[in-house]
Image: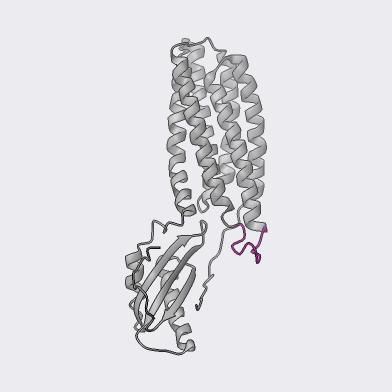
Amino acid sequence: MSKNHNHTHHHPTLSGKNLLISIILNIVITIAQIIGGFLSGSLALISDAVHNFSDVISLIISYIANILTNSKKQTKQYTFGYKRAEIIAAFINAASLIVVAIFLGIEAIKRFSNPQTINSNLVIWMAILGILANGFSVILLKKDANHNLNMKSAYLHLLADMLTSVAVLIGGLLMKYYQIYWVDAILTLVISVYLIYMSWSILIDSTKVLMLFAPKHINIDEVVCEVLKVEEIKNIHHVHIWQLNDHDCHFEAHLQFNKDIKLSQFDLVCEKVEKILLEKFHINHSNLQPEINRDDLKELIKQD
C-alpha cells in the first residue's frame, strides 16, 4: 500500500497554566460552599458545591490530558501518541456532569415536600464568592475553548458554575427578604436541567470522535465527487474518514486508475488529491492505495 501524508496544519497552543489556576480556585470554592451549605441548610448551595467538586475532578482530568497531548510524542508502540487524551477527558467531563445533575434533580424533588429554613446571609456570600472565582476562570479559558473540545468542556463547566452561583444568589436574596424557602429546591432543579442541557452536545460530539464517525461537516459523497474530478482516477472505494482529535482529520481510500502508471505519476496524483482534501474538506492526513485491475468489491463503504 502506498501512503501519502499531509500534516500541513497548525495547532493552537493551549494554556495549561490557566487550567491550573482554575483548579485552585475551584478547590477553594468547593470547600467554602460545602461548609456554607451545611451551616446554612441550603440544598442549592450544596448542589453548587457538588457541581464545583465535579469541576475540580474534570479540570484535573483536562489538565492531565492537556499535558499528555502537548508533551508526549508518538512512539513505535503508541503511534498516535496521546492525541485522544483530551477527547476522552471531554467525554468523562460531560458524562460526570450529567450524572451529578440527575442526582441533584432527584434531591431537589424530595426537598419540595420538606422545605427547610435556611441561613440566607451565608448563602448570599458564598454565591458571590462562586460568581467572582468562576467568572475569572471563565475569562481565563474562553480563548482556548473556541478551538478545543476538551477546553470547551472545562469552559462550559465553569460557565455553568458561574451561572448557577448567580441563581443561588438570587435565591438567597428571595429567602432573605421574602422568606420563600422553597425557591432553594426550585433553583436546584433548574440548575440540574441546565447542566444536562450544557453537557449533552459535548457528550455526543466526543462519543462520535471516539467511535471514529466522520466529522459532521464532511459529506462523503461530496468528497468522492471532488476526488473523481482528477482525470487519472476511475473509481474510489473502501473509504474511511474519521477524526483523531479536534484538529486532525484522517482519510483513507482505494483509488482505481484508468491505466497503469509509474510510481512517480502516482505521487503527483496523490498531491492533487491531498490538496483537494485539505482545501475543500480540511482533511490533513491521507492514506491512499492505488489499484488498476484488482479483483475486489468497488463499494464506497466496505461492509466488514
Q: Is residue 299 visible?
A: yes
Residue 128 covered by magenta stretch: no
Where residue 45 appears, x then y in whole percent? 55, 22
Point 64% across, 57% down: residue: 70
Write the start and end of the magenta stretch as one range: 72-82
Instruction: Identify the main secondary structure in magenta.
Output: loop
Point 52% across, 46% down: residue: 152
Q: Quadrant of the C terminus?
A: bottom left
Quadrant hosting residue 81: bottom right
In front of the other: 227 or 188: 227
Point 51% across, 76% down: residue: 3
Would you say 259 lies left or right of 22 here? left
Where residue 142 appears, x then y in whole percent? 54, 46
Q: Is residue 143 visible?
A: no
Residue 79 covered by magenta stretch: yes
As drawn, 256 above or below 279: below
As drawn, 290 above or below 57: below
